[in-house]
Amino acid sequence: MKVIYCVSELLDWIDVAKYFQDEKGWEPLLWLTTSKNISYATQMFPSIDKLDFHKANRGILENQLLKKTIILSKNIVLEYLKYEKIAIKMMDRMDATGYSFNPSERTQLYYCILEFLLNYIEGHNPQIIIFNESPHSPFTYILYAVAIQNKIKILRLSPTHINANTFLASNLDNPELFLKNTYKQTIKDEFISDEVNEFIDRINSTYENATPYYMTKIIKANKQNNVYKLGKSFTKFIKYYFKSKQKETYYKTPFNSIRSDYCNTDLAYAALKATFYKITLQREYSKYVKKSTKNFDLTHKFIYFPLQYQPEKSTSPEGDIFADQFLAINMLSKLSIGRYKIYIKEHISQFSIKLQGEQGRLKSFYQEIALLKNIVFIDTDISSFSLIDNSIAVATITGTAGFESVIRNKPSIIFGFPWYKNCHGVFHVQSPSELSAILNKIMNNYQINLHEVKYFLESIFKVSEKIYLNNSNKNSIKDTNHDNVKSIISLIEKYENKYE
């Protein structure tokens, strides 16, 4: 059994791969990672094929690994057309300035990676591909697409971001069928754990008590004024500017090929420009909030649509075609005329100096939304829970607010494929006709049953393990005796046979 490991820099994955090699005969075929642990993988598995994560995403590929000579054709391009749009949108995260990577260059990179992977998969015939989370870089996503089209087993870890609970999934758009049986048994047992009750109680309290751990630093940084933000940015500029060595990243510089080196001096200028841009982006958003002030009233009938931070895996790829959030907002707007308003609130992370929001939001995005009917822009300081509680429903692509809403007794409309997609009170939408039927159902006094929400969450926890997928979220697990390798192995061993 040959396995491709498409995982993070976490060294735990090497021990996991060694275990499955020894116990199940899963031979590591290809390891995609960064230079930080690629040497460890080579030491453990000397004959393994290896690709550097950043180089692979820039189209710098090891053609000596190929045994076949498949050439892209019209039929192949059409077969993968759905994935092409999503992969090209995903390349936003490679554009350090927001205007360095045009559509033609992106398409060329997509074709380069697709042809390489078609040949590699055909020549080496892997049986399993393991992703440590949803594939959200161009190379990993195109690999995922090729795996689907070639019916290769996909094992994908899916974090809930609730107490590090992580379950095993496969395709992004397929439900976890084994979860249905667990859910039925949970209802039969009528058992709810303290962990579930504590989480539900926290979400039903104040927003301050329910704020996710990963948002705390973002909120704190956003409270600083623009002078502070520019000062921090200039300090970063100086730090990067005098580091002349090549930067290990997949960013593209203006007017150069994506394969050209990206240096720290490039990053210095990009970081400074990004801060200026995000300040102006926030001002642009504030203009529309000010224009909407007279229309903002919590006693009106409205659907709350919290925008999601971009670029991020929660929309690309988990939002599928709705990674362009305008498509969802447009659909809601067209079906809401004369019935209710759509309250739009930007995610504060979009303006954060700690993140790359400049890569995922154009000023024109707000302008296009403002042209729609029944749109009201909401100040980012307004409590999300206040908006949820006063709405008739929450609509999102895959955002956390979609799950918080059902806990707070409001139905949720989702356009993508979040981990909570199959929860009671959550309605998945792909077309105007589906949305129209759902809105009619909600308007007809639809009621949330909190017990069913609890049973769903209990079921998720039952099929999950406590796992941190990157060193950056290691602190999400408080148990000092936690064995992350053991948890990953246990999760895969229990559920890998549930997927074809």
Image (spheres, rainbow, N blue to C red):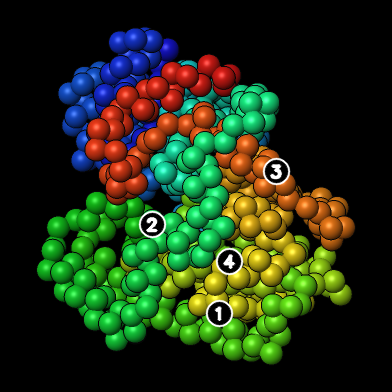
Q: Is the C terminus in the top left, top right, bottom left or bottom right quadrant?
A: top right
- Disc 1 vs disc 4: Cβ atoms closer than 8 Å? no
Give the mark nearer the N terminus: 2 vs 3: 2
In which image quadrant can residue 237 be found?
bottom left
- Identified by mark 2, the residue type is Tyr
> Which of the two discs, 3 and 1, sits closer to the camera?
3
Q: Position of residue 480 (x, y in %)?
A: 24, 38
- Identified by mark 3, the residue type is His
Q: Is the N terminus in the top left, top right, bottom left or bottom right quadrant?
A: top left
Q: Residues within 10 Å of mark 2 (few under 14, many from 20)?
A: few
Give the mark nearer the N terminus: 1 vs 2: 2
CA gap between label 3 and label 1 equals: 30 Å
- Identified by mark 1, the residue type is Asp
Determine which residue is flagged by label 1.
379
- Disc 3 vs disc 4: Cβ atoms closer than 8 Å? no
| Helix, strand or loop at mark 3 | loop
> Which of the two discs, 2 and 3, sits closer to the camera?
3
Q: Position of residue 477 (x, y in %)?
A: 33, 42
CA gap between label 1 and label 4 equals: 14 Å
From the viewer's perspective, is residue 423 above or below residue 28?
A: below
Q: Residues within 10 Å of mark 1 (few under 14, many from 20)?
A: some
Nearest the camera: 172 or 217?
217
Give the mark nearer the N terminus: 2 vs 4: 2
Give the mark nearer the N terminus: 1 vs 4: 1
Compared across the picture, whether 328 is left or right of 195 comes to right
Q: Which mark is on residue 214? A: 2
Determine which residue is flagged by label 4.
385
Q: Which mark is on residue 120? A: none
CA gap between label 3 and label 4 equals: 19 Å
Determine which residue is flagged by label 3.
424
